[in-house]
Amino acid sequence: MAAAGLSRADARLTADVLIRTDMRGIFTHGTVALRRYVQLMRDGGIDVTAVPEVMDDGPAWARIDARRAVGMVASHCGMTVAMDKAAACGIGMATVRRSNHFGAASAYTVMAVENADRPMIGVAMSNTDVVMNIPGGRGAAIGNNPFSYAVPARSQPPIVLDIAMSTVAGGKVASYQARGEPLPEGWLTDAEGLPTTDPGVYTVTGALTPFSAHKGYGLALLVESLAGVLAGAGVTTDILSWSKVSDDTCDEGHTFMAIDIGAMMPLDDYYDRIDELVRRMREAPKAAGVERTYVPGEMEYDSEAISRREGVPLTRMAAENLKGLAEDTGQLDSLPYDLP
């Protein structure tokens, strides 16, 4: 990234987000995308010199122009501003326009729960280019619009939900295509709006399905309203696909929210209550043959702990993309692994 002109600080921040995403087991949004991001930097879709700017703000809110910056840089700025507003007012919100793909939404909500001085509840969302159909529709009409929240706990891992509004993320479809495997039924529709298990249809005429039909569609519209309309960013078909267009910005929009827990109740009281909530979930009766149930984000928490002990795992697709990036930048000799 630095070789493509990105500042060392922004390159480090972006790398940290992608590597930690892999450590948490979210392989569809980690280093597998780095080669494409660098291509966007080289072709002009990402402005490597951009510094996100607060255009307008009030005591508890701010509107930020990313100025075509790397999505991770713009999003780190957005959540930082939201947290600063929350520290002053109890709750803070920041919208971001003219941004690019921001990776895994939980990368930014985790910032809030790990805020050492004032642990906060974090919310993050982004709209995307149109990849999802609507119930009864034919073809893609709206993005799958990722959403995350993170809630800190004391004696338990934080509760962290990170979802897209489609049945599965597009990256999972790409993984099946790379392996030459058919998709599970219900993930994808073809050009006529009919179910298909062919992953190759996705990038041509297909569309992801919204999870639980009208529920995923309705939540996608909420994200579109907050991260697109309210942020002043592109909306639905205004947004360019970061995986297809490299010489212009996606114009994705993001919205970040932070809640200062200590402003609303004593932290000890909060932690007693949230720990009890998690305990009740864990001790709920289990189905036959099930040894353990999980709260949202717990599997990722466990994956990160293993990664810190044993090293960061890479999927074959990520390893191949990183090898390709090393070839693109003339750094193949420095690659720390060989592919069979």
Image (cartoon, rainbow, N blue to C red):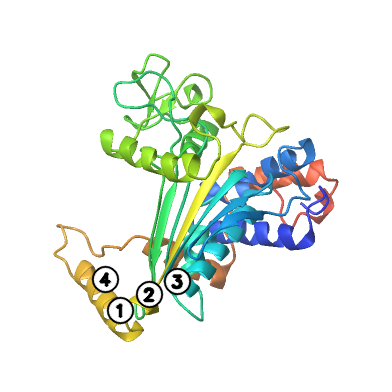
* Vertical order, 1 against 281 (above or below): above
Q: Choose the circle earlier in sequence order: 2 or 3.
A: 3
Give the number of the mark in front: 4 or 3. Answer: 3
Give the number of the mark in front: 2 or 3. Answer: 3
Toward the viewer: 102 or 82? 82
Tell me the tag on residue 261. 2
Q: Which amino acid type is marked by label 3?
A: Cys
Contact (Cβ within 8 Å) of mark 4 with mark 3: no
Q: Which amino acid type is marked by label 2?
A: Ile
* Direction top: furthest residue: 192
> Does residue 340 appear in the picture of this structure?
no
Contact (Cβ within 8 Å) of mark 1 with mark 2: yes
Q: Choose the circle earlier in sequence order: 1 or 2.
A: 2
Mark 1 lies on residue: 270
> Does residue 135 appear in the picture of this structure?
yes
Left or right relative to 126: residue 320: right
